[in-house]
Image (cartoon, rainbow, N blue to C red):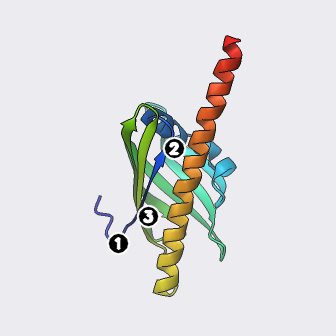
Amino acid sequence: MSLQGAQEYTTEVAASVKGCFATIIDFERYPSWSSSVREIRVLDRHPDGLARQVEFHVDITIKTLRYVLEYEYDPPGGLTWRSVDGDVESIEGAYRFEKLAPNKTRVTCRQAIVIGFWLPGLIRRAMERTALQQSVDEFKQATEARIATAKKTSAKKRS
């Protein structure tokens, strides 16, 4: 994957690599934690059950975009995607999860988007950067909340 013109954002998440991977592959939950995702549908799955093609409806303020991404996985270290249909000319991206400690992971998202309609370059780049950073930060919050909920559930079962 060349990802020419890609934007990249990295953060640290208080979760294991497996915990991060579990959040990113749970597509049906995206609308509950991603502020821009309005609707999501898994269209097709790989033989192992992981989503292969996923349809997104994303609010980018000026309009709602529909696109379908096709995913490949490197569990639990990450995943890649590319667009195969929709309102966007092309999207390519990758999430990578790197273990820093047992419950600390460096998360890097890299994505290149060609939206296919004109926006001034400065506005387009700023919008892409903000959207990428917001997406990764929301992923971090969702993953850490998921881990906290699992710990509470586990503690209740033990008591």
Return the x and y of residue 159 as percentages of the image width and height.
71, 12
Quadrant, the N terminus: bottom left
Mark 2 surroundings: few (<14), some (14-19) or many (≥20) residues within 10 A: some
Return the x and y of residue 139 as percentages of the image width and height.
56, 49
Spatial CA distance of label 1 from label 2 is 23 Å
Mark 3 lies on residue: 91
Label 2 element class: helix
The disc label shown at residue 126, or none: none
Mark 2 lies on residue: 24
| First of labels 2, 3 by sequence position | 2
Label 3 element class: strand
| Residue 24 visible in the snapshot | yes
| Residue in view at x 62 percent, y 28 percent | 150
Spatial CA distance of label 2 from label 3 is 17 Å
Placement of 41 over or under 153, stated as above or below:
below
| Residue in view at x 37 percent, y 38 percent | 99
- Viewer-closest of 60 and 153: 153
| First of labels 3, 1 by sequence position | 1
| First of labels 1, 2 by sequence position | 1
Placement of 14 over or under 41, stated as above or below:
above
Placement of 56 over or under 103, stated as above or below:
below
Return the x and y of residue 47 as percentages of the image width and height.
43, 32
